[in-house]
Amino acid sequence: MIDVAADLVRSFPAPIVAGVLTAAVCAALGVFVILKRVVFIGIALSETAACGIAAAWMLGLPPMAGAMAATLAAVLLLAGPFESRRIPRDAMLGIVFVATSSLALLLVSGSGFGLQEIRALLYGDLILAGWPDAALLAAVLLPCAAALALFGRPILYTFLDREAAAVLRVRPAAWEALFFLLLGAVEAAASQTAGTLLVFCHLVVPASMALMLSRRLYVVLAIAVAGAVVATVTGMAVSYRHDLPTNQTVAAVSVALLVAAALAKGLAGLLRARHRP
Amino acid sequence: MTPIILCESVCVAYGRQEVLHAVDLAIPRGILLPFVGANGSGKTTLLRAILGLIPVRHGRIVTPFHRKPPGYVPQQRVIDPFYPVSARRIIEMGLYPANGWWRRPDAAQGGRIDAILDRLGLSGHQHKTFAELSGGMRQKTLLARALATDAEVYIMDEPTSELDERSEAEVLGEFRRLVHEEGRTVLMAYHGLDHAAGLSERICRIARGRAEIVDTATARADAGEARRSPGGGS
């Protein structure tokens, strides 16, 4: 497998860089997404980005511009306070998901492309990423990761106890909006290259594994990022070796890691219980 | 003496339902003031309006919170116990008004938190997460976070509801120390007039959407009379 990975790095360096960047940043953001309990926002924003790409393609604009504009519009719609509204945020996320995923396909359905081409256009394929894609990802994702590291504390306080945060002048609405903007920007940039499924996978699966394994935030973040990166490199190597679709293989390896971690944790718990006097 | 908090003709409503009607209160500085009333009488609503967490429909509330935010103890159910943060990290949240988003706690602030942990018997539990703490320890963690703000005014929503007798006595002792030794003001939603009687000479009595500060003895006499009158409580 190491030979395969080395061969993969030599043959596809740009997809590896793009994949590792996407995995690491999405996994770190994913920890906060799960803590905030807004997991569905991951898939809704990915579909919104795809819809933006389709609209940009129709209008002859750069796909990234369309993805960013659509995602940021959705973020503005979803970032507001939903606590006192009759329609909860989850329902609004569902509406955005249904509207954008159907609109994306409707926009490009008259293009004459086949289904596979439409899927590649809207949802990307990691193995096809070039250096310009990797550079674009780095330009968007690295500043977002830096902002998350810098502002992690007030964002955490906002998610932990919104009312106390308001009393303590944390300005929860502003930090929540910033978090969703970061998430929107990352999803818009990553969805075009890595695809909706893989971005959603990196947001949810490694963070779930990390939260299952540790109760310390920094350890959780480290496990999530490491797990996502390992799943990406391993998944890409498996897909290269066995000629499998890259995005789906990486997602499957990520889920396999989660299942393995759950089994290991369960086994460790059983062994501890057996050795307890 | 100038009141530290002033409510003038305050009305608060949820939708069309008015919960507080024209409340006038002048809360003096350096007092321990239990807010006492039946369930749904509006104790928590009034405290939340004073905190600025819910808007008032009419009237105004004057507080010193623009200078220094209050120490706030919510009911512990607001915290998701599965957050991967330690009790100490939760307590350090109380330093936010002093430190903002950029500054880490310095040695003096760390020492102050150590002292609070010690007073509340939390020192041995500071590295546990909320999920690993008992109900009483969680309540004390939220109290410690409020104390870390070093506020002029502390506002607490049923701060002893999850505590056993011994812990309740410790916490109430801490409130008395805040008021009598440090001159702070403590407002708290509290679960009964009889309990409040041993705590403070005055209470804020809330009933039928109105609030007034009365002597505890008077409130107890009124309550006794109401119970004895035909159709009164048991």
Image: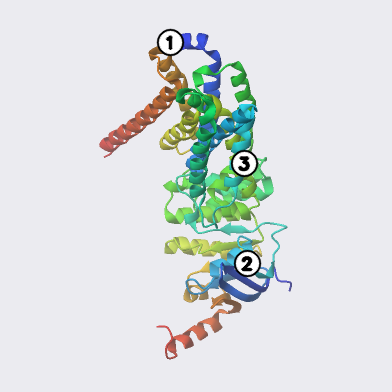
> Quick one: label 2, few (<14), some, or many (20+) residues within 10 Å?
some
Task: Quickly name the residue at label 1.
Answer: A4
N-term-proximal mark, 1 vs 3:
1
Question: Regarding mark 3 in the picture, which secondary structure is present there?
Answer: helix
Residue B68 rendering spot, x and y as whole percentages: 69, 57
Disc 3 to disc 2: CB gap under 8 Å: no
Subunit ID for the residue under disc 1? A
* Alpha carbon separation for disc pair 3 and 2: 54 Å
Residue B186 rendering spot, x and y as whole percentages: 60, 65
Residue B222 rendering spot, x and y as whole percentages: 52, 85
Which residue: 57% across, 46% down? A78
Question: Regarding mark 1 in the picture, which secondary structure is present there?
Answer: helix
Q: Taking A156 as reference, is B204 above or below it?
A: below
Mark number for residue B180?
2
Subunit ID for the residue under disc 2? B
Q: Are marks 1 and 3 on the same chain?
A: yes
Subunit ID for the residue under disc 3? A
Task: Quickly name the residue at label 3.
Answer: A73
Name the kind of residue labelled 2 in the image.
His
| Camera-side mark, 3 or 2 | 3
